[in-house]
Image (spheres, rainbow, N blue to C red):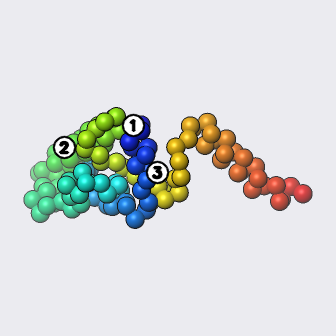
Amino acid sequence: MSEEYKQAIVDHGMEDIVLTERLSGTPCNIINTPAAQKLGYKQSSWEKWLSRNPRTKKYFKMMVQLKGMKMLEKATKPNYYNQLWSAGQSVEMVDGIEPVETIIANLTEEYRQSFQPFCK
């Protein structure tokens, strides 16, 4: 992941998470950045019609999902100007950027400590 994406996770809280239908055609959570605000949160009536019409539904949803996946993929790359970052309300719990090894070691230690009162 890009350093910008990692820092965005650290810098934002659960109040910064918004639900959008515009990215994938299916509601998903993203960080409320200026790029997200520009994209919008709700599908237009035309987009809703295309996604519900029996003849166009399958193709329209495929197109929207492909476009959304490409946008999210680009957002993970360094120095990408259009910051659309997928994230959930759990960003509230993230305090810093650490290597995976450190996170796993911390989780393992917390797990062991949680059983200590029962082992006496």
Q: In the rendered structure, are the residues bearing label 3 and label 2 in contact, judged by CB atoms less than 8 Å apart?
A: no
Q: Residue at x 39, y 43 (%)?
A: 5
Observer able to see residue 25: no
| Above-or-below relation of 6 to 87 | above
Q: Tell me the number on the disc at residue 10.
A: 3
Looking at this view, is 16 or 57 the one in front?
16
Residue 45 placement, left or right of 83: left
Residue 6 visible in the displayed image: yes
Q: Quadrant of residue 19?
A: bottom left
Mark 3 Cα-neighbour bin, 10 Å: few <14, some 14–19, many ≥20: some
Q: Position of residue 92 (x, y in %)?
A: 49, 59
- Among the two numbered marks 3 and 1 on one chain, the one whose residue lies closer to the N terminus: 1
Cα separation between marks 3 and 1: 13 Å
Q: Amino acid at mark 3?
A: Val
Residue 45 coordinates in the image, percent (x, y): 12, 63
What amino acid type should be assigned to the residue bearing mark 1? Ser
Counting residues from the start of the chain, the first of labels 2 and 1 encountered is 1
Task: Give the residue drawn at x 13%, y 57%.
Answer: 47
